[in-house]
Each structure stands twice: as structure tokens, then as C-alpha cells.
């Protein structure tokens, strides 16, 4: 790297600009409650932003519910045979979903979209939000998607024929 030419550096800059031009998405505006009402975090003062970064999200224990669901696994031929799920390190809802699905007795793989592999898989499956859980039948065909523990429970309890 010490002996790079100006042309090589210019080429790298052009490649980076091209990659930057192909980035898809938009800025997400985060709202949370402060002093009794909701406001956009980006409009907070420096002290409140610092306080927000130090907050700890509540993570309920879904162990008992997951154990109950193991015994109620669907025996239907069209029941989900596998699933994949997508999470992000900073997502406040992801830990609860991850904890719940990890206890299900269905073959699964998890991806963290903060990693290159996770982001590539998310693009492959057109995942635009986290947490997302995608269920597949035995043939690998997508059955349905769920975005919360409540939705996962509802989908696993409902007949697959009614799934969208």
C-alpha cells in the first residue's frame, strides 16, 4: 500500500463512489419518549442523546412460551420445515425474536445484517426490516414471513393453507 500510484488511488476512489451511488435505502427517523411525549431523537440536545445511548432495552423472558410451543409443533405436511431469520445488533426488538426462534425445534439459520454475509442474504430474500423470520416448506418454498414473537406464534398456530 505504501507504493500506490496516483492512478491506483484514483481508481479506488472511483470504485468507492460507484459503490456509494448504488446504496439503496433511506435515513430512518427514530422516535422515542422523553419528558412525557414522543420526539425524533435527531432533534434532541447533546445530553439527551447521550442518555438515550445509555438506555437498556427491556428483554422479556420467552423461555416458558418457547417450551410450550415445542410440544405443540404442527404435524401438518405443509407445516414449516425450516426458517431463516434476520436481526441487527442495534435493533430493540431483535433479541426477543431471536431468543424465541432459537428455542423452536425447526431447522433454522440466523443472519445478522450488520455483517457482509447477513446483508447479502437480506438482499437475496428482499428483507427490508428487522427482525424478519421467513418460514419455508420441505421443498424450500417460502410459506410466510413474521416480524415479531406475536406474529410467529400466530403463524405457527394457524393452518398453513391460510398463510399469505
Image (tube, rainbow, N blue to C red):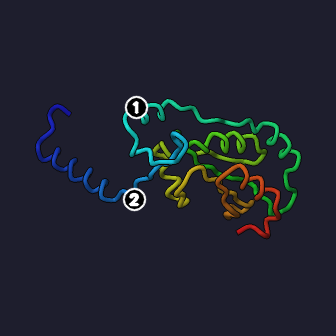
Q: Position of residue 44 (x, y in %)?
A: 40, 41
Q: In this view, does 25 lie above or below 108?
A: below
Q: Is residue 40 above or below residue 63?
A: below
Q: Mark 1 points at which residue?
A: 47
Q: Which residue is drawn at 27% across and 56% down?
A: 18
Q: Where is residue 134 in the image (x, y as percent from the top left)?
A: 65, 56
Q: Residue at x 77, y 53 (%)?
A: 153
Q: Name the residue under label 2.
A: 24
Work out which quarter of the rendered image holds the N terminus and state it.
top left
Q: In this view, does 97 lie to the left or right of 51?
A: right
Residue 43 seen by the camera: yes
Residue 143 position by quadrant = bottom right
Q: Residue at x 63, y 39 (%)?
A: 95
Q: How many circles with numbers are drawn on the protein?
A: 2
Q: In this view, does 38 lie above or below 140?
A: above
Q: Which of 2 and 43 is in front in this view?
A: 43
Number of the front mark, 2 or 1 = 1
Q: Earlier in the sequence, mark 2 or mark 1?
A: 2
Q: Distance between the residues labelled 2 and 1?
A: 32 Å
Helix, strand or loop at label 1? It is helix
Helix, strand or loop at label 2? It is loop
Task: Classify mark 2: residues with Cα within 10 Å, few (<14), some (14-19) or many (20+).
Answer: few
Q: Residue at x 64, y 51 (%)?
A: 84
Q: Mark 2 and mark 1 in contact? Answer it, CB < 8 Å.
A: no
Q: In this view, does 28 lie to the left or right of 138?
A: left
Q: Which of 3 and 20 is in front in this view?
A: 20
- Kindly identify which numbered label has been placed on residue 36: none
Work out which quarter of the rendered image holds the C terminus and state it.
bottom right
Q: Which of 40 and 150 is in front in this view?
A: 40
Residue 118 seen by the camera: no
Q: Position of residue 127 (x, y in %)?
A: 54, 57
Amino acid at each position: 500500500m505504501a507504493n500506490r500510484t496516483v492512478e491506483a488511488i484514483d481508481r479506488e476512489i472511483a470504485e468507492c463512489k460507484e459503490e456509494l451511488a448504488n446504496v439503496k435505502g433511506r435515513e430512518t427517523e427514530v422516535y422515542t419518549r422523553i419528558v412525557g411525549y414522543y420526539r425524533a431523537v435527531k432533534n434532541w440536545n447533546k445530553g439527551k442523546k447521550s442518555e438515550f445511548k445509555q438506555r437498556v432495552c427491556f428483554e422479556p423472558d420467552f423461555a416458558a412460551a418457547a417450551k410450550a410451543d415445542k410440544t405443540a409443533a404442527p404435524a401438518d405436511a405443509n407445516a414449516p420445515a425450516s426458517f431463516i431469520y434476520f436481526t441487527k445488533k442495534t435493533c430493540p426488538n431483535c433479541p426477543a425474536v431471536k431468543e424465541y426462534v432459537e428455542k423452536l425445534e425447526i431447522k433454522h439459520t440466523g443472519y445478522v445484517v450488520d455483517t457482509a454475509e447477513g446483508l447479502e442474504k437480506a438482499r437475496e430474500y428482499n428483507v427490508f426490516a428487522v427482525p424478519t423470520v421467513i418460514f419455508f416448506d420441505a421443498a424450500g418454498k417460502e410459506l410466510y414471513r413474521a416480524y415479531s414473537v406475536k406474529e410467529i406464534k400466530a403463524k405457527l398456530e394457524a393452518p398453513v393453507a391460510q398463510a399469505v
